[in-house]
Image: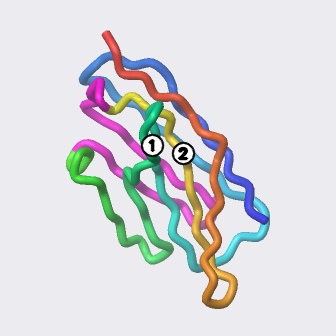
């Protein structure tokens, strides 16, 4: 079992910045994908950014160039630096960690942290 704890959400004005952090604990594997997803009421959860254990990153087109995902394998953390925030970025942001048990992928989720972009 893996536990994910997020921090760093809040209220920010358009154009501002926030940094989300997620720390993983428990049965940590060396091979993983960690990422951030977000969800607004009535909509499915959508991918924001992911980072693999080898450092390879992916971003949603809507955040490319504004958000930066990073990880620290020694601390089992993943951060999401969000710059030039827009009202459309308002959502609950969830940390995710995917590991494998043999060929079976297992997803773990944090409890979510609210990000509100408003003037």
Residue 90 to residue 108: above or below: above
Count residues near mark 2 (Cα–Cα under 10 Å), then give few for <14, some for 14-19, many for 20+.
Answer: many
Figure quadrant of residue 49: bottom left
**Which residue is located at x 59 percent, y 39 percent?**
112
Q: In the image, is residue 62 part of the stretch drawn in magenta? A: no
Q: In the visual, does 17 lie left or right of 71? A: left
- x and y, in percent, of residue 52 in the image: 46, 71
- The image position of residue 53, as x and y in percent, is 50, 74
Magenta residue span: 66-88
Q: Secondary structure at mark 1?
A: strand
Looking at the rendering, in which quadrant would you find the C terminus? top left
Q: Eyeballing the image, is 97 above or below 80? A: below
Judged left or right of residue 19, residue 6 is right
User: To which residue does mark 1 refer?
Assistant: 38
Q: Residue at point 25% right, 31% down?
A: 84
Label at residue 68: none
Task: Answer whether labels 1 and 2 touch (C-beta < 8 Å).
Answer: yes
Residue 94's tag is 2
Residue at far bottom of view:
102
Q: Quadrant of residue 113?
A: top right
Give the residue drawn at x 45%, y 34%.
42
57, 109: nearer the viewer: 109
Could you tell me which secondary element the residue under label 2 belongs to?
strand
């Amino acid at each position: 079992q893996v536990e994910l704890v997020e921090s760093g959400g809040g209220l920010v004005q358009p154009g501002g910045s926030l940094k989300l952090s997620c720390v993983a604990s428990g049965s940590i594997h060396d091979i993983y994908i960690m990422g951030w997803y977000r969800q607004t009421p009535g909509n499915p959860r959508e991918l924001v950014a992911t980072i693999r254990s080898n450092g390879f990153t992916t971003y949603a087109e809507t955040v490319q160039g504004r958000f930066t995902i990073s990880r620290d394998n020694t601390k089992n953390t993943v951060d999401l630096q969000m710059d030039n925030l827009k009202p459309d970025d308002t959502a609950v942001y969830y940390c995710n960690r995917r590991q494998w048990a043999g060929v079976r992928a297992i997803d773990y989720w944090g409890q979510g942290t609210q990000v509100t972009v408003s003037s």
